[in-house]
Structure formats: structure tokens, C-alpha cells
Image: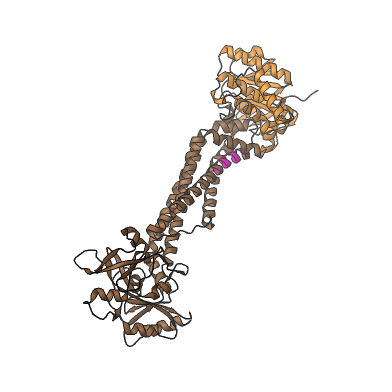
Chain colours: A brown, B orange
Amino acid sequence: MNGFVISLAFKSLLARKVAVLLSLMAVALSVGLLIATEKIRGGVRAGFESTISGTDLVVGARTGSLNLVLYSVFRLGDPLQTVSWETYGRVSEHPDVAWTIPISLGDSHRGYRVLGTDDAYIEHYQYGNGQRLGVSDGAWFNGPTETVLGAEVARSLGYALGDKIILSHGIVSVDFAAHDEDPFTIVGILAPTGTPVDRTVHVSLEGIEAIHSAPGDDLQPENITSFLVGMKSRPTVLRFQRVLNTYQVEPLTAVIPGVALSRLWSIIGPIEVILMVFTALVFVVGMVGLSTTLLASLSGRKRELAILRAVGAKPRDLLTILTAEAVLTSAGGVIVGWCLAYGSLLAIGPQLQSRFGLVLEQTLPGRFDVMVFAAILGVSVFAGLIPGLSAYRQGLNESLSSG
Amino acid sequence: MADAACLMENVAFNYRDGGDVFRLDQLRVEPGETVLLTGESGAGKSTLLGLLCGVLAATTGDILVAGEAMSGRSGAVRDRLRADHIGYVFQSSNLIPYLSPVENVMLSGGFSKKRATAAGASSADQKKHAAELLEQLGVADLDRAASTLSVGQQQRVAAARALFGAPPLLVADEPSAALDHQNRDRFFEAVLSQTEKQKSGLLVVSHDLGVAKHFDRHLELASIARWEAA
């Protein structure tokens, strides 16, 4: 008997194809947008947190910890002070220290930051979930006039191996300060990482020195901007941080990147909240649309419900029909919405990764999706119940006699 | 003696406490008997139909359909009794627009196992029964969408639905109001020959005295029922 009632709901939906498809699409768009936004939001956050990994301390001259992380990790802002090469040498030789990566900033190439470093960078720098950098094309630099480009720099400026580029002093891409007597040869291009490394031009420390000195000078660096430290064992990190922060010879700041990153995220986090609010509003609008469509269709169906009552349908049967129609419509909408969201994310995923460094986890629908599904089913059951209940209460008598 | 198709006796009903009370002395329709009930607007025709079909619950009195008590039963039981024992025809707009004429007729079996079984052992048999009823009532286009049929054809489909599964009682509320005279007479002739065949009682409520010639008996509602102040 119940099967018969459900089959009536199906036939009724089929008979109103256009209207049903429209409300199904409204649900689908709402769900698709919700899931896509949530995925991208999660990707932005995960991408932010995976900018750097494996590094225990970021060390620079005495400055704010956020400032230090901004220029050392994100290549944002300008370092004001430097660390002496002597201090760097002493830290890197400390028995608890596993490795150090020197960072020397201050130059740029057509808007992209130039970073002076050495072989430790390609050997020890890690991002994401402990992934290492890889040279996708060519090799790591091996001399003061060679350079290795991040993936985005090479792609957006159209550079290939063997091209010669000129670095300018400062970060503005104007020509007057160009060190045009010192062209660098591109010997390698890094694999994309989805981190600021992609937007960096890498040269040797000697190369940086060469830009700023007269020909024939000693290329041994005297200062660097900051450096990254990897410890041999985790428990020594806090103690060593304290040692560096109270270093007598030179004022230093040493920060644990994870701590600084979460402080930074707490500053930009409200943007995430705004995104979530908009997402929630999209969802609410979709749900209101769904309820409106269901309720509006009812007035045209009073007659149909009266006929069903006359042939013996119980109020419960009418409730079943109306609720089943609502649930079928919105379940269809949710499935189409899922396909839209995951399909388009799959399609534009590579683009997002290469253009914005945004890596979306290709996971199966998870708890969030289940919650969305449950919410929509809840709303549609509710939206089906309202007309169902009004049909329940409506005396058949008036419908029996109304012509 | 066989149970009456329907029997209402000493029925009282009021829509709200303290409102006027509808009182009905007796209404009896025998199996195979056709009765025309006429009355002024407001005389209580809708109330009588509501009580007889179990949509309204009588305050006191007996209402029996095919020997089963409708009065004093729960709404769900009254719904089942209506599904099993009563075929109902509205004044107009009788059909579910998204079902074919045959599906509309078979609707009666969808909510009553008894009617379905009476119509045929298998769903193929039931479908055949529905198609035969439609044919006998003069509905030619069985595959057309119900909503595209003429009003006369729609009323015939509605009558076939009421007849499906041979219920003991057919109730019709102004079934010919939307039809012209020629159509009206042909409609009643077709319906009456079927009720006779099925031995169903027929109760038709109408304004139109012109149809009285088709019926075994003509009753004035005012002669059996009245409204009384509480």
C-alpha cells in the first residue's frame, strides 16, 4: 500500500517536471556552492598551515616574530636588520643543530623576490606534510651567476633553462636600480609546491654579494637576513630558542614557525568567518527557495488531495505523498549539487594549484557533506509536512462538496 | 434480508459546540436501488454526504455502510470503510491530471485491497476490469492524459472509478451539473446500467429535478432532515 502511495508521489513529480527540475536545480546550486566554498576554505587554511614544515626555528635580527615569519616564510615585507655571518656560522655548528638554511633577501626580479641561499635549501627545506623541494627542470645552482626559479616565476614570465635574467635592487620592478651588469643564467626550475617558494627567484649567497659589490671583491657574505634551523631532537627546540633570544653578542629573535603561523592565522581568521557567513546565507536562501516552491505548489493541488481522500486515502497517505515529493526533490538536488561541486573542483583543481597554490584535498564526501544532506532532508521534510498537515486538518467535507 | 447499501438512523451532528444541530431521521438505500436526493442550498446536503462518507463523525445515531458501522469509529477506520465500500463522484474536476484514465479508475484499488481483489486477481486483471468499465461507460481514449478529456468524458472516468471493484454504495454530488442535457441523460443511463449490473446502491444529490426519471426513488432532504437550534 505504501509502495502505491510512493509511486503516486513519483508520478506527480514526473507530471510537474519543469517546476520540479527548477527547484531541484535551486537545491543543487545551493549545495554545490556550499560544498565548493567549504572545500576551498579548508584548502586555503590547510595551504596556509603547510607553507613550511620540518623547520624548528626561524631566526633573524631582533624584530617582531610575525614580521620575521612574514619575510622569511611568506616573502612579504622588508627585513630591516641583518644577522652576521659569524653568528650564523656559530649556530649552524652547534651540536644540537641538525641543519641550517641561510636566507638573504632584498632584491627582486620583475616583482618576484630574490632569495640568496645555499645547497642546504634544496636539501632541507620542507613544506606541506614534510614534502621536500624538487628540481623539475635542470639542476640546483652551482655558482654565483646561476639562478633557480620557482615554478610560478618560470611559468608566468615564460622563462626556460638557459635564459639570462637581470636582478634589481629593492622589490619594485623598475629599471633604474637594475644591476644590469650582472645577468644570471637560469639553470633550474623547481617543481610546483603551492607555497611562496613558487614565487621566489633563488640565487647563491655569493650571487647576492656579487650584485652589491665591485668586480673582484671577495664574495664571502658578511650578513644574511635570517635563517631556518632544524634541530637534531625536538625536545631541545624550546631551550635552544631561549638561548638564541638571549644571545649576548647580537640581538636575535627566534620563533617556532607553527606558533607564529597560528598567530598569523588568528589575525586573518575573521576573513574565514565572513566566508562562512556568506556560505551559510547561500544555504539559507536555497532552503527558503525550496520551502517556497513546495508550499506554492500546494495551492494548485488541493483538488488532487481531495480526490485522493475521497477514494480512501488516509491523511497519513497525503502526508507521505507530499513529504516524499519534497524529500525526493531535495535528495536529487543534493546529489546533483555534489556532482557539480566535486566535478568542478576536480576540473579546476590543477588550475587552482598552479595559479593560486591552493591544494584541495580530493577526499570523499565527509562529515560536513553528511551534515548538509541531513539539514536539507530536515528542511524538506519540514517543508513537506506543513502542506501535509494543512491537508490533514482540512476537512474533506469542504473538498467533497466543492466543485 | 441483505444489508442495506447504506443506512442512517436518528443521526445528530453539529460543526461546533452550541451550533445548530443537523438531525436526520432515516435514510436507507437498498442494494441495487437508485435514489435521488434533492434539497435547497443550506439544507444540509454536504453535511449528509460528509457523515455518510465518514469524513464527519456523527454525535449520535447510527450510520452503517454495507452493514458495517461508520458511526462511533475512528477516523482511520472510517477512511478504510470509505475506501472499501463507497465509490464517490464529485461535481467536476474528478481526475488526477497526471494519471491516465485507466490509472485514475484503478486508484480505487490502490487504497482498498478489498476493491482491488474484487476487480481482479492480478494487476493485469484489474487493469482489464478498469478498461472494460471505461468502455462500457463510453470512454474511448484510454491512453489520453486525463486532463485533456472533455468534461463529459471526465465524469464518465470518475463514474468508472466509483464503480471499480463493485462497491456496495455509489455516492455522487451533482455529477451532471457540468453536462448539457443530452450528455446528462446518456451519462445517467450508462452509470445506472452498471450499478444495476453490480447491484450497487446509488445515492445522487442534485438540484436538477429533470434527472428524477432515471431513479427508483426521489427524496426531498427536507422530509428526512432538518437543522435545529441547539
Residue B162 drawn at (x, y percent): 66, 25
Find the magenta span and give its range.
A317-326
Residue B67: tell me if it is visible: yes
Q: Foreground residue, B203 or A129? A: A129
Q: In this view, does A166 lie above or below B102?
A: below
Q: Which residue lies furthest to the left in this view?
A: A176
Q: Is residue A174 left or right of residue A67?
A: left
Quadrant, the N terminus of chain B: top right
Residue A277: tell me if it is visible: no
Q: Is residue A357 left or right of residue A316?
A: left
Q: Is residue A174 above or below residue A387?
A: below
Dominant secondary structure of the residues highlighted in magenta in the image: helix
Q: Is residue A132 above or below residue B135?
A: below
Quadrant, the C terminus of chain B: top right
Location of residue A10 (image quadrant): top right
Residue at image coords 30%, 63%: A163
Residue A155 drawn at (x, y percent): 35, 59
Q: Foreground residue, B194 or A50? A: A50
